Image (cartoon, rainbow, N blue to C red):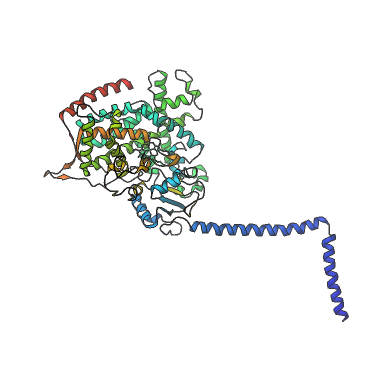
Amino acid sequence: MTIVLLLKQSACSLTALNMTNLLLAPASLAALFTYDASVVAVFGAVVATVLIAIHLRSLKWKRMPPGPKPVPFIGNTHQVPSVKPWWTFEKWNKEYGPVISFWLGGTPVIVLGTAQAAWDLLDKRSDIYSSRPRFVVAGEILSNNMRGLMLPYGEAWRRWRKVLHSGFHSRRAEAYTPIQSLEGKITLVDMLSKPQEWERNFRRYAASVVTSVTYGRRINSIDEWIVKENIAAMDYLMSVNIPGKYLVESWPWLLKLPRALQWFRREPEEYQQRDIKLYTSLLDDVKTRMNNGTAPDCLTSQTLLDQGFVPGDDNGSAHIGRTLSELDIAYAVSSPFGAGIDTTAGTLSSFVLAMLHFPEVQAKAQRELDTVIGPSRMPEYEDKGELPYIRAIVDETLRWRPVAVLGGSPHAVTADDEYKGMFIPKGSTVFANMAGIMRDPNMFPSPDDFIPERFLISSPLFNPRFAPFDLPFGFGRRVCPGSHLARNSLFISIARLLWAFHIKPATDKEGKEVLPDPWNYTNGFNSFPVSFQCKFEPRSREVVGVIKREGAAALDELNSRWT
Ligand code: HEM
């Protein structure tokens, strides 16, 4: 009994002692106890939050747009063909929906397969969909972040883009139409004298328009050094931009190795020196002509002036640098070369292909030209308002075979996003698959047929959503800055080719017509018809006379302009 009482007492006294200790203990001790408790609480809360966040995130990731099942480490890389992947993307869009996702290694890729999805995300949410994926070798090492096309969305890109915007916005582009018209007349002469070289003639036209408006110098042939050097620079750029070619694209931490150990740098850095030499020599040439007062108004002269260059001053270049360095300018004004030649010339080749496969369209267009223009003069820009069917053919060509088949360069998302209940993670690469978008039968019934009437306001097939038809030129803040220049080139070239020539299939030895395969297109970010033969027969002797007369006058005028 006594023992039990003692035990009871001691238990009570222990309890009392503990209570007393807690109440009477020094403040520091109490704080220590309190602190320990809160550390545990905070730690627990952090762990719980992290676990909840991981759980929620994994739920989010499960809500990514549907797509083919990835495998560990490589994702879906093995399922994406290196040749014309846009057909596979179109197939997946048909199978899984207008917005699909897959994985290239550790990078999520989103493909938009309808115009609506592209408008909703790339246009309406352009604040977070306007960046580019990281191009380690092509953008960072080879181009030292000076090729704006590959720059992520941000200040450097904005400064670069301002140069192109002020050089090619719609009013400024109007000022280039006299050059485009004169060059177009030279092209018609080339088409008369060497019709078998029609693709080269188109390339010369596109290249001469670009060099004239950027550097104030025209070209007579695509074999001139300025074209060859620029093409070589573009070819190398393309050659390093092949997925899987460089380990450092998937493992950018390799850039943290001592420079001497970064084996992948040597060759692109050598080519960077070659690019710098080319672009600065073209810039210096314009500066020299500005100094002696012979430089025509062009993108380069305009940008140099905007950036503070003082022509005629011995130290004129020292003032350059309001927002861009001289090298930045040299790179910025070189961009139209890479972006504006294959796109324009390739679209003209698609137009020729369409005319071979849809002769009734050709005949209808020629009826319009005969009514509005007649054979005694050639179409001019002033006739544009009177030639709705020709304008519709331009739009339909851009739709029928979009040259920027994957929407140009891919976009990248800079923040997590939700779209129609689907989760789109930050850092995803986003393609607007033009090949699929332009063949969406809901938007473009009978998509494989060439039907200009879709773009004719007077036609029941007209869809007002496509007035104007901007879709081929991309989306949001990255939309093509050269679209006005490109459209003007396409309009005048197409109007005059149809006015001047019957475009007919080539014939074999037995005289049988040989139609080129309408799907035989090149691989690459710009896709255009693989070279084919066809005939350009002048429509009348009167037309030939006009071409020769106008062509000679155009050459005189161009020579007096640029020398
Ligand atoms: C038929 C002709 C052309 C087509 C179909 C075309 C189409 C495109 C497309 C789809 C894009 C990507 C837009 C995006 O990322 O959403 C683009 C970008 C670009 N285009 Fe064009 N283009 C053409 C001609 C031109 C011309 C003539 C120039 C030169 C003045 C030009 C300069 C550029 C540049 C510099 C970019 C990059 C814009 C940036 O990243 O901010 N393009 N183009």
Left or right, 497 with respect to 273, comes to left
The x, y position of residue 395, in whole percent, is 31, 40
Q: Report the quarter where the N terminus lies.
A: bottom right
Residue at point 30% right, 32% down? Answer: 385
Residue at point 26% right, 23% down? Answer: 555
* Residue 264 appearing in the image: no
Residue at point 40% right, 53% down? Answer: 98
The x, y position of residue 108, in whole percent, is 46, 52
* Residue 282 appearing in the image: yes
Q: Report the quarter where the C terminus lies.
A: top left
Residue 364 sits in quarter: top left
Residue 74 sits in quarter: bottom left
Residue 273 sits in quarter: top left
The x, y position of residue 328, in whole percent, is 46, 32
Residue at point 32% right, 37% down? Answer: 344
Left or right, 120 with respect to 486, comes to right
The residue nearer to you, when weighing 478 against 464, is 464
On screen, residue 84 above or below 342 = below
On screen, residue 331 above or below 133 = above
Query: Extreme right residue here?
Result: 2
Query: Extreme bottom residue here?
Result: 1
The x, y position of residue 532, in whole percent, is 23, 42
Query: Extreme left residue here?
Result: 510
Left or right, 130 with respect to 378, comes to right
The quarter of the rendering in which ligand 1 is drawn is top left
On screen, residue 144 above or below 38 = above
